[in-house]
Image (cartoon, rainbow, N blue to C red):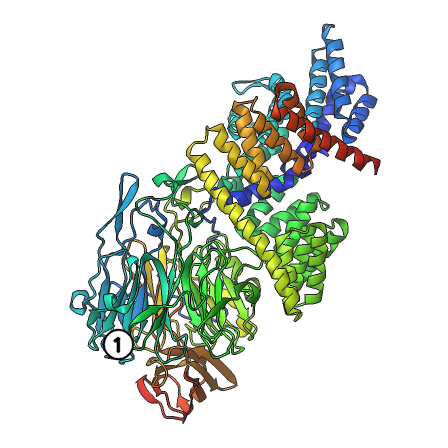
Amino acid sequence: MEMNVLNRIPCLLCLLLLALILSCDRQSSSPSKPTSSGPSSPSLSKTDPFPDRAKEWGIHHQQASGRKERTAIFESLGSGVAVFDANGDGLLDLFFNNAATVEKSGDALKFLPGPGCRFYLQKKKGQFVDHTQEAGLSLDHWGTGVAVGDIDNDGDADLFVGAFGKNHIFTNQGNGTFKNHTDASGLKGEKLTSSAVFFDYDLDGDLDLYVANYLKFDLNSPPNNGKPCLQNGIPISCSPTLFDPEDDRLYRNDGKGTFEDVTSQAKLTGTVGGYGLGVVAGDLDRDGHPDLYVANDTTSNFLWKNLGDGTFEDIALFSGTALSESAQGQSGMGVDLGDLDGDGYLDIHVTNYAEESNAYYKSLGDGTFVDRSHLSGIASDSFPYLGWGSRIIDFNHDGYLDMAVANGHVHPRAEELGNGSDFAQPTQIYWGSTGGKMKLWKTEKDWALTVPRNHRALASGDLDRDGDLDIILTHLDSPPVILVNQAAEGDWIGFKLQGKKSNREGIGARITLKAGDRVWVKEVTRGGSYLSSNEATSHFGLGKNKTVLEVTIEWPSGIKTRLTTLPANKVYLVEEIKGSAKAKELFGG
Amino acid sequence: MIFRKFCFIFFLAFASENLAQEGPEIFQQIELMLSAGRYREVQDFANQKISQLGAKAGNEELILAWKRVAARAYQREGHLEKALQIWQELAGTPNRITHLRDGLKLIQTQLEMWDLEGAKQWLKALPKPLPQEFKDAQQELSALALLLSGEQGKARLLLNQSSEKSFTGWHNLGRLEFERGDNAKALVALKKAAKIDPDDYYNRLYLAWSHLRLNDLPQATEAFTSLAQSAPTAEVFELLGRLKLREGKFAEARQWSLNALTLDADLAEAQFVLATALKRLGKTNEAQQAFKKFKANHQKQQAGLKEAYRLNQIHQQDPSDPEKALVLGKHHLSDGDVASAERLSWRVLRKHPNHGQARLTLARAYRKVRRFSAAAIQYQIILKTKQGAIYSTARKELQELIQAHAKKRSR
């Protein structure tokens, strides 16, 4: 053989991998922008099935996330959005966290004021008014994630506002105005927080708080002696690997909205890696105790199994949810849970970096999972894109859960990095079908979904109260996007829970629903996705079922509530009552 | 891979054409000697011929032919600097190319020495339009230069225009598409390459792997099973294990991963497949042990990557500093990224040919990928030019190499 060339064969692979992993840590993808038609794509092919109504509805503030060149890693994170009814008028309002700007001061970095957070009150359907100041939510900080939960069980939704710096807690006064509860809340430390989630880990009837933190970034001493890292000679933000990870925190609620840091007591420490970006809570092994799943950037993800005694154990590796199928740690960004294959157990969807497939971990019901990323059909179509926010929702009401993914690269000069990838990327919807099969929706060029943007957070809620779930997206620089769902064609049903012994919003309750010959299972949550908080109402697409035969709600307290024969296409309010109960119609029909 | 088809076809024609005057037996003999690894004998023979012919007028063409033979022998032995010197003498300069074929061979050698700037300069200087017979070679070399520079987008465009006969072009395109995750396109390109050379191991491997990624399990099974029979490597066994996991055949997955680990006990991916298979077989304790083993290996890999990134940034901020390049190169070598170690050593040696540590790193890199003669050359250069500790180290390692080689032969 000429020149020992076989020895060189791995060199190309090594080089490509090297280019991908090391010198080009944040290497752009080379997206072929794959498209495929969905199995149940709505017939509205001519008109945009998810038009952007943000501007028309009065949502137009500027979002900020640092300098255009984004050579500090936190400038690529973006900020989140919360979807909740702040004043109890039945309409959903929106809180947008917002980052700021930054400037170089010698080798150090200094924050400059940004445009500030925004709170929009929905006065009437499709009419949002900037109510930030009146609500007491003016915050001009480097905002990141946001979480919503009724922390004092007084019947209204309170806010956790994450930051690179001091995190805040605002308690709702019941009328859509808020009191800054931060100093009395017990929250400590000024870290680089990403996402957070409220859940009742100790089942004592109040909501506790898990805060995912990203990494230790010292503004006075940025990495690489204050210089940007380089890829092919192009300045880029340095990879997380140049930083130490920042530990996440668990705060226990004393029932009155005051929190105690119980991270060490809960044994949520001692793991390697852990650049936390996305977090979701859910009872993944169905032992009655809510677990946590954390999507970590560049390292193994965490699956914190709740042992039921106030402590947790990371079982991600054994459970099959830590790594990719090829045993690689990926760059987890967003995460959501949903019973994608209809077997009654919650599966996990994680969005990852470009040139890493998004992950679909199918639950086997015993707390272990199998990687179905390839088998489900999401692997190839997600590979070229860098995914962030993600929601598992039945958008078209055909009875099968779909996936929405917000994409966007981290490097503004991605196009110059060698692969022909773009900084701005489209939002994707994967349509679900039998057995958890997913298929990317072939969207038209002029649809709002297709428009490439620097997406980050993705949240959901029925903003126009037409029974289907709309999508709210944040970006790095431009105003938010509200994609109003006009693609739903089937029947649906929704449940808003009101806990008594359990936490007020019934977070963590499991709803099992029977209609026709199908059974659906869902856990009540506001968390999931990336930096965001979603409407707490549990929403089910029913296909062609006009009536739900039976609903069982298993509350975190252990109480079971049973409902029978409910007409579809309505949202019902259900109270925590043992045995048979009647549901109150809220809207719809 | 990139070089192989190109070099083989190219040199075969080259040698026969120029040595015809010496008789076909000599050509055949030289080919046999080269195939047998008797590079030094060919070099000596060629050099002897060159001195003999040099005394007589009218032998210029024959002298050139024998110089080419010598260059080939040096190149195959791994004495790239010597080969490059001859190709440079034969090819001229980018401004005045005297022999186009030699120019292409020069570019190839430059690429093998990771001299991307030099190769690009020559590629740019090639006459336009290039005679048809050189077009494939030029395109393949251009694509390779782009690939090695990390310009995958441009390389892809070029590789898509590969001729129907270019195994290298289609194979490399397939590999590129595979890395980009476009498995359907990878499959198309690799299939085209397979039509040209159905036996190539890496082409078969990536073809099978593309089927696996596309979830085409029957095709993947067929391709991997056939590959495992003809090329039973750890990576093929590990991928078969992964395939069996997907199929839900956990006992088979366990067996394939064990087969892989027999060949390479540190193959983390195989440890992961084994642990997963054991878990799915209900062997919880064994699975936990296997995961523990995998985790330790995985964490070591992660730490290595982290350090490589840090050192790479230090190097990139000051790429002309040989010591920073070499620190990174040595790290890559210890981490198993031999190609990068090789690249960085050559980078230093281009400007500092007497840099002993760079030579030593290069020798060790070649040794790691079993390019023993190339490693020996580097050790020998150190022994000729250096003294002190590095001399002793090179001598010791060269002796080990020779002893290992001798043992292998005696077996």
Q: Quadrant of the C terminus of chain A?
A: bottom left
Crowdedness near tag 1: few (<14), some (14–19) or many (≥20) residues, C-alpha within 10 Å = some
Judge whether B300 appears above or below A38 on screen. above
Q: How many labels does the image show?
A: 1
Question: Does residue A470 appear in the picture of this structure?
Answer: no
Task: Locate residue A350 relative to residue A460 in the image: left or right.
Answer: right
Is residue B189 placed above or below A373 in the rendered structure? above
Residue at the bottom extreme? A580
Which residue ends up furthest to the left in the rendered image? A134
Q: In this view, does A545 lie above or below A128?
A: below
Q: Mark 1 = which residue? A: A91
Where is residue A47? Give x, y as percent. 36, 66
User: Which quarter of the picture shows residue B292?
Assistant: bottom right
Q: In this view, does A23 lie above or below B58?
A: below
Chain letter of mark 1 equals A
- The reply, left or right, for residue A10 in relation to residue A38 is right
Q: Is residue A81 left or right of residue B156?
A: left
Q: Which residue is drawn at 39% across and 47% down?
A: A411
- Residue B40 percent location from the top left of the image: 75, 23
Q: List x then y, in percent, for residue B47.
A: 73, 15
Front position in the image: B191 or A459: A459
Instruction: Report whether residue A133 is seen.
Output: yes
User: What amino acid type should be assigned to the residue bearing mark 1?
Assistant: Leu
The image quadrant where one finds the N terminus of chain A is top right
Q: Position of residue A288 (x, y in %)?
A: 47, 79
Label 1's element?
loop
